[in-house]
Image (spheres, rainbow, N blue to C red):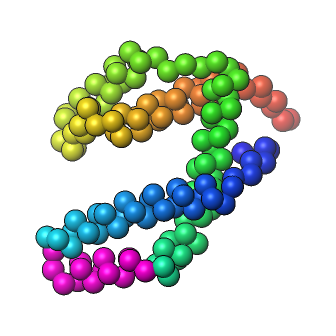
């Protein structure tokens, strides 16, 4: 990514930050409903513009890198004509769920569209990175 400058619009960064912050607030809200006064106070502190501004300031660079990587992966995927193999995604999804069961980790809901979308996105990222590594032209320095 350092070789290719990708300008990410500030509105995209803020929109991604809003989505991430909303999820953080939703989790704090769920904890506050079942929790004590401290969790309700934590929720109250999250519901301020200053708290969101601090979150944005701390996460802006990471969000920008993430979006730039997503754009780069999408560009490589489009240029190379990579298509998602639904059967391969499904097979890998079943393997992942079985791995979770075997290692006694929480088993994700395979019918959850958000989980399936994020799993598919991870699969595409790995496929693009494999393609890049497989076709990389390496020049060894003496």
In the displayed structure, does residue 126 sit left or right of residue 99?
right
Q: Is residue 114 above or below residue 39?
A: above
Position of residue 130 in the picture relative to residue 138 (left or right): left
Question: Residue 15's x, y, as percent?
Answer: 54, 58
Q: In the rendered view of the protein, which quadrant contains the C terminus?
A: top right
Q: Is residue 15 magenta?
A: no
Displayed quadrant of residue 87 = top left
Q: Would residue 44 be seen by someone viewing this image from the given angle?
A: yes
Q: Position of residue 78 (x, y in %)?
A: 66, 25
Q: Quadrant of residue 136?
A: top right
Residue located 41% across and 18% down the image? 86
Quarter of the image for residue 47 reads bottom left
* Relative height, residue 76 to residue 4 (above, below): above
Give the vertical position of 134 relative to 35 (above or below).
above
Q: Which residue is most to the right?
A: 142
Between residues 127 and 115, which one lies in front from this camera angle?
Answer: 115
Asked whether 125 or 44 is in front, the reply is: 44
| Badge count | 0
Image coords of residue 61 (percent x, y): 62, 62
User: Does residue 58 appear in this view?
Assistant: no
Asked whether residue 39 is drawn in magenta, I would say: yes
Q: In the rendered image, which quarter contains the N terminus?
A: top right
Which residues, given as a range, are shown in magenta? 35-48
Q: At x 29% / y 63%, what residue is drawn? A: 27
Left or right: where 60 falls relative to 36: right
């Amino acid at each position: 990514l350092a070789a290719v400058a990708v300008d990410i619009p500030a509105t995209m960064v803020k929109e991604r930050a809003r989505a991430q912050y909303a999820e953080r607030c939703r989790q704090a809200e769920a904890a506050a409903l079942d929790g004590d006064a401290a969790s309700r106070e934590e929720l109250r502190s999250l519901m301020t513009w200053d708290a969101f501004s601090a979150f944005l300031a701390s996460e802006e660079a990471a969000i920008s890198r993430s979006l730039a990587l997503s754009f780069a992966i999408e560009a490589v995927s489009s240029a190379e004509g990579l298509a998602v193999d639904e059967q391969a995604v499904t097979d890998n999804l079943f393997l992942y769920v079985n791995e979770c069961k075997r290692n006694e980790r929480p088993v994700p809901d395979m019918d959850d569209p958000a989980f399936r979308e994020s799993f598919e996105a991870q699969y595409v990222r790995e496929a693009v990175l494999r393609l890049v590594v497989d076709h990389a032209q390496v020049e060894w320095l003496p």
